[in-house]
Image (spheres, rainbow, N blue to C red):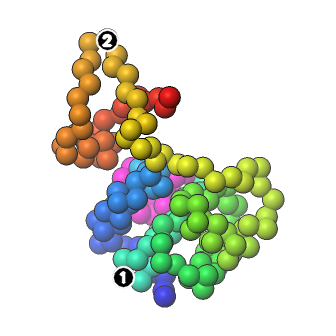
């Protein structure tokens, strides 16, 4: 398998992949939408694609790593070691299993950390979701159009878990 630098023509399929895995990719999707590829902003991205649309790997200018490559092997993750050289990595975000495989292959797992824990991310079963209406608001079931608005960042919904 091979990693290659993402190009402008890749953004559409990358965005679709991120939306399909929104529970582990919301920060990367937001950064990609705000800054695109190659920005010098702190959360601007350098992004690599695995083979023909099998996954992505990203590093922000501020040192956050995001992984989304379900089919990646140890060899694939190890191939990214050169991209880490000389960089201070602050966070590794993504699916816990993929993130841990990446960290083990590249040697990051052996480095000291201030926090090392798997988080459930932003995946919530709809049965556990509680939405509070504010004065003057009505709660309505999600429609496809409303869900698309949420995914495009056009709508912010306050929520709490019981």
User: Where is 101 relative to 131, above or below?
Assistant: below
39 relative to 132 in the view: left or right: right
- In this rendering, the answer to whether 49 lies above or below 91 is below
Measured as percent of width and height from the top left, residue 5 is found at 45, 76
Q: How many marks?
A: 2
Q: Is residue 49 visible?
A: no
The quarter of the picture where residue 155 lies is top left
Tell me residue 161's x, y (percent): 49, 31
Q: Position of residue 120 (x, y in %)?
A: 55, 49
Direction front: furthest residue = 127
Structural crowding at the residue carrying mark 2, measured as other residues with C-alpha within 10 Å and reported as few (<14), some (14–19) or many (≥20)? few
**Residue 18: x and y, percent?**
38, 60
Between residue 28 and residue 131, name the one nearer to us. 131
Whether 41 is among the magenta residues is yes
Q: Name the residue under label 2.
A: 135
Q: Distance between the residues labelled 1 and 2?
A: 49 Å
Residue behind mark 1:
52
Horizontal relation, residue 147 to residue 159: left or right? left
Q: Residue 15 carries which label?
A: none
The residue under the point 19% across, 40% down is: 143
Q: In which quadrant of the rendered view does residue 29 lie?
A: bottom left
Q: Would you say the magenta stretch is mainly helix, strand or loop?
A: loop
Magenta stretch in the rendered image: 33-45
Label 1 sits on a secondary structure element that is: loop
Residue beneath the point at 37% across and 27% down: 131
Q: Say which residue appears at 46% left-offset and 48% top-offset.
A: 123
Instruction: Determine if residue 152 is in view.
Output: yes
Callout 1 environment at 10 Å: few (<14), some (14 to 19), or many (20+)?
few
Q: Is residue 8 magenta?
A: no
Farthest residue, direction bottom: 1
What SS does tag 2 mark? loop
């Amino acid at each position: 398998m091979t990693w290659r630098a993402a190009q402008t023509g890749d953004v559409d399929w990358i965005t679709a992949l991120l939306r399909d895995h929104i529970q582990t990719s919301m920060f990367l999707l937001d950064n990609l939408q705000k800054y695109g590829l190659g920005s010098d902003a702190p959360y601007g991205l350098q992004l690599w694609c695995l083979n023909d649309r099998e996954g992505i790997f990203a590093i922000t200018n501020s040192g956050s790593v995001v992984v989304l490559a379900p089919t990646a092997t140890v060899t694939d993750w190890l191939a990214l070691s050169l991209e880490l050289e000389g960089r201070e990595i602050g966070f590794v975000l993504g699916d816990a299993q993929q993130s841990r495989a990446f960290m083990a292959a590249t040697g990051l797992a052996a480095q000291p950390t201030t926090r090392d824990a798997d988080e459930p991310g932003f995946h919530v079963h709809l049965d556990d979701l509680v939405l509070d209406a504010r004065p003057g608001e009505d709660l309505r079931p999600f429609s496809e159009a409303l869900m698309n608005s949420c995914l495009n960042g056009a709508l912010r919904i306050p929520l709490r878990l019981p």
